[in-house]
Image: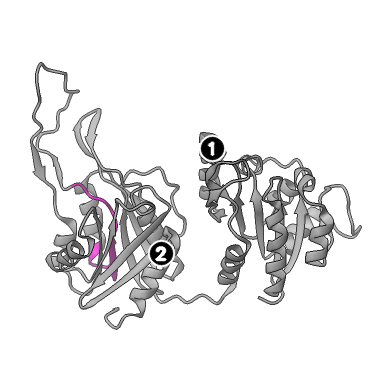
Amino acid sequence: MQNKNILLCVTGGIAVYKAVALVSKLTQAGMNVKVIMTASAQKFVNPLSFQVMSKNDVFYDTFDEKNSNVIAHIDLADWADLILVAPATANMIAKMANGIADDMVSTTLLAATAPIWIAPAMNVHMYDHPAVKRNIAQLYADGYRFVEPSEGYLACGYVGKGRLEEPEKITALVQQYFMPKKQPLKGKKVVVSAGPTRERVDPVRFLTNFSTGKMGYAMAEAARDLGADVVLVSGPTNLPKPTGMKVIDVESAQDMFDAIWAQYESANIVIKTAAVADYRPKNTHGQKMKKQPGDAVLELERTTDILATLGANKEHQLLIGFAAETNDVEDYGTQKLQKKNADYIVANDVTEEGSGFGTDTNSVILIGHDYKQKFAQLPKKELALRLLETIAEREDFK
C-alpha cells in the first residue's frame, strides 16, 4: 500500500466524523491521503482535523490556489490513484450523475481520470427516493463503483439502510483493490445467465418471477475480474449493463436457451443463475384477452429444461447451476446436482431475510460431488467472487 495516493472527497452530513477515522485508517495502512471538503462538510468537522490526520493541506475552495505552479483541482485529480467520495450525500451524487461542477469537490471529480468510489450516507427514505435511485443507476452505468451503505440506526432516528460503511471495511476494500490480482479464470470463456424470463400470454400480459438479476450480474462481474472472457445472457432487468463483457438480452425461456446453446460448445464454464420459467402458455393470443363471465383457464406447457439439457450434452464444460428454494435447501440442491448432471449447485433459501430475490446480500450452500461449503450472508458481489475463487481452487476445476 506504500505510496498509493488516495483523494478523499468529503461532503456534508453527520457521517463526516467517520471520514476522519477513515483518513486515519488509510494513512496507518501506508497510503498518502489528501482531503477536499464541501462547505457543508465543514459545518460538521473542522478542516484542521483532516489536516492533522492526513499530514497534508485540506482543500475546500476552488479559487484558493495553495501552489501557484499548478491549478489545484486539476493537480489533485491527476495526483490520485483512487478517489473516494465518503460520505456521499444525495446532493453530490446528483451533481456527479449530471456533470455539475460548482465547487471544489465536484469540479475535481469532473476532471478526474482515476477510479472513483462512492460511499453514500443519508436518510433511509432519501436513499430509496426515485431520483436518487436514477442518479445511482446512471453512475453505475458510467463506471463508478459504490461502497454500499450498511443498515442500522441512523442519526435522524430511523433504522434502515443509509449508514456510511465503517472506515475499517472501506480501508480493507481499498487494500484489496491495490493487491496484485489473481486471475485463475484467465483464458477461460465463461457464459452466465441472469435475471427472470417472461412468457407472453398476450400482447400486454406475461408470466414471470421475482428475480432481479443481481446475483447473476455479480457472478458475471466476478468472472470478468478473475480474468475470464464473459458472455452474459440476461433476461429483462432494471440493472445497468456491466462493462468488459458481451451482453445478450433475451426475453423468454426459449430465447435464453437458444442464446446459451449458441455459446455452449466454445464455453469452458457455464453459470446458470437465471430464474427461468418452467412453464409457458400453450397458446399465445395475438390480441388482448378480454374479460369473460366466470373463471378462466390458462393451459401451460413445459419449457426446455436448460440446465438438464446442458448437463446431458456436457463434454469439457464446467457446469454450475443455482437453486432458489423455500425449504430443505441442501437436500433439493443435492438432488438437482445429480438430476441435471451439473458439477456444482449454489443453493439458497429465498425466504431467509437478506437472501431472497432483489436483496443486495445472499447466503448460500455450494454443493459439489462429495463436497459442501456454506457461505454466510455477504454482499452479492463479494459472495460471487468468493464462490468462483473457491471453485477455481478445487481439484476438479478444468
As drawn, which residue projects farthest toward the top?
A: 293
Label 1 SS: helix
Residue 375, can we see it?
Answer: yes
In contact (CB < 8 Å): disc 2 and disc 1: no
User: Is residue 366 part of the magenta span, yes or no?
Assistant: no
- Percent x, y of residue 310: 18, 63
- Percent x, y of residue 193: 30, 56
- Specify the quadrant that holds the N terminus: bottom right
Residue 245, can we see it?
Answer: no
Instruction: Name the mark nearer the viewer: 2 or 1.
Output: 1
Q: In the image, which residues are magenta?
A: 264-277
Q: Nearer the viewer, residue 329 or 244?
A: 329
Amino acid on which the number 2 mark rests in the picture: Leu
- Percent x, y of residue 67: 90, 59
Around disc 2, counting alpha carbons within 10 Å, would you say few (fewer than 14), some (14 to 19), or many (20 or more)? Answer: many
Q: Nearer the viewer, residue 384 or 162?
A: 162
* Mark seen at residue 125: 1
Q: Residue at x 82, y 67 (%)?
A: 55
Q: Is residue 151 left or right of residue 331?
A: right
Q: Residue at x 52, y 49 (%)?
A: 140
Label 2 SS: helix
Q: Is residue 311 above or below residue 98?
A: below
Q: Residue at x 18, y 73 (%)?
A: 315
Q: Residue at x 75, y 40 (%)?
A: 102
User: Is residue 273 part of the magenta span, yes or no?
Assistant: yes
Amino acid on which the number 1 mark rests in the picture: His
- Specify the quadrant that holds the C terminus: bottom left
Prevailing SS of the magenta stretch = loop
Q: Residue tagged by mark 2?
A: 383
Q: Is residue 52 left or right of residue 328?
A: right
